[in-house]
Amino acid sequence: MCGIVGAVAERNITAVLVEGLKRLEYRGYDSAGVALINDAGVLDRRRRVGKVSELDAALAADPLPGRVGIAHTRWATHGAPSERNAHPHFSGNQLAVVHNGIIENHEALREELKGFGYTFSSDTDTEVIVHLLDHTLKTQPDLAAALKIAVKQLHGAYGLAVISAKQPDRILAARSGSPLVIGLGLGENFLASDQLALRQVTDRFMYLEEGDIAEITRDSVQIWDVSGAPVTREQVQYHEGAEAADKGEFRHFMLKEIHEQPSVVQRTLEGRLGEDHVLVQAFGPQAAEIFAKAKNIQIVACGTSYHAGMVARYWLEELAGIPCQIEVASEFRYRKVVVQPDTLFVSISQSGETADTLAALRNAKDLSPGNGGYLASLAICNVGISSLVRESDLTLLTLAGPEIGVASTKAFTTQLVALMLLTLALGRVRGTLEAKVEAELVAELRRLPTRLGEALAMDHVVEKVSEHFAEKHHTLFLGRGAQYPVAMEGALKLKEISYIHAEAYPAGELKHGPLALVDADMPVVTVAPNNELLEKLKSNLQEVRARGGELIVFADEQAAMSNGEGTHVVNMPHIHDALAPILYTIPLQLLSYYVAVLKGTDVDQPRNLAKSVTVE
Ligand code: G6P
């Protein structure tokens, strides 16, 4: 994910821009750049490949002062990481743009603009924006008015910022699918793709909404909505309590992180969805080409990330029709694997530093392509500057933000979202997923944050249910289909933080062994979305009840399951079956949390465990 920072002030703002970029660097980077208009009205830029510190050093050696400027850290989608592809991009020597997102019709626009005499100096999709705007300015010289016209021709996702030497007192911004926030100062104003970048200069923010265009000067902010009507957006005051390294109103980091899931899922989707499809380039410049060749998937991960991969296997085979294997990294790395031709190697990791996962990736890369090796490697990871990301060919970052609780929660659900995006992208590129199904799932993904919020609203119901566990020593978790790994994740959460022994089984396996354990002291937790396996699951539950086992069932509100003796049903909001694993994870997280609180264990730092296992 790229990062944007902009500033318009009475003071020199170069340091503000660079500091903002440094704060965004955790999302990953491959190059960075800054453009400013100096007091003589001259637009100039510095760009460097690598970390923001490279840019900082370049600016120290060759300063670029100015009172209006925009800056960017790039994560390549079109065109390799290089200085010529780094933002800001210029049209002539008057106009500069920085952009997050993907312009899908860039090739057609590029041809059209070449016809108007524009020459391109980069391989990026972004450069079409700046030339298109320049072309529009020839007939509509007002920057805001021209931007409103120009963005109508862009298909895809963008958050962008523009400065012009002809109107040097302002920054223009436009948002569609990629977030932007305005930071309000005293006699100076700012812009960024994440308020984190501006925390050093202000605590007052204004979030742009979809389709908004904004004109920002030192002492004014003017916003127009998607219809072109002037609007005002609410001012939000930032409080320290909202900070990741602070529990805020929550008793534990884990509870805070559970409740952050609607917003981090939203963030993970931003900039990755077109109107009715996933933007394949979000996975990297080579993604479309690699996905088209992929005939198999091999997933490798540890712990919670492994469970995310297990869910993805159901999705990849069912929706994208691509064979998928999954293995825990600590096993994979020590055995001789037989690789099917054209297999994409996918690693999943919150930290990107887990020793076994990294070793598995390195082993996979050691097998030469075309000679028993993998087609390419893709990392699904929450830390953009991690080893896993640096060493993989393609990356999709989960944007969960720092996760402090050792038991992984928001990292898991954002991994699932990323894996659903991968499923849809692979399905489309390979022609194995109908456009209508993809469109339906994209619409469902957009609704997902709201559904997750509804599930979180049941917090107190789950808290009540947790009372059935506090005195127990063993628990079974059951699920079928893609809910089986969800049950595994539920069992892992419970054992990690409450130290209650918990095991997960596919519900159909119950009678092949674990049923022998069921009695009044062994609660059985089940997730039951309303799908074709529901009736079978209901029979499995009868088997438990017949042995006196207590049942806790998280069931679709349409599944017509009701409370009875020894059966506690918690109704869940209805959701598309494909996304049910993400939704049903929430009550299981809450359940383990409240059981641990009742037991008085150390929720955020459970005994014997570590957040990031960087040694074998
Ligand atoms: C540790 C953590 C788990 C995590 C696992 C894999 O065991 O306690 O929460 O799932 O490592 O970590 P990763 O960073 O690779 O996802």
Image (cartoon, rainbow, N blue to C red):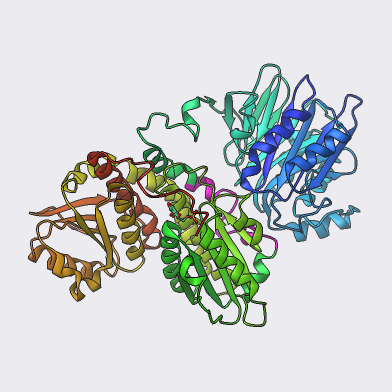
Whether residue 328 is visible here, answered yes or no, is no
Residue 554 highlighted magenta (yes or no): no
Q: On the picture, is 294 further left or further right than 528?
A: right
Residue 38 position within the rendered picture, expressed as x and y whole percent measured from the top left: 87, 28
Report the residue at 71% width, 58% height from top: 105
Query: From the viewer's perspective, is 169 left or right of 259?
Result: right
In the image, is 582 to the left or to the right of 162? left
Tell me: residue 528, above or below residue 232: below
> Where does the magenta region start and end?
265-285
Q: Nearer the viewer, residue 106 or 245?
A: 245
Looking at the picture, does residue 503 appear above or below residue 588?
A: below
**Residue 168 in sight in this render:** yes
Q: Residue furthest top?
A: 186
Residue in the foreground of this view, choosing between 137 and 404: 404
Q: Position of residue 307 (x, y in %)?
A: 41, 61
Give the x, y percent position of residue 349: 51, 57
In the figure, 562 relative to 219: above or below? below
Q: Quadrant of residue 213?
A: top right
Q: Position of residue 32 (x, y in %)?
A: 76, 44
Q: Residue at x 61, y 36 (%)?
A: 225
Quadrant of the picture in which ligand 1 is shown:
bottom left
Tell me what residue is drawn at x 53 percent, y 62 percent: 357
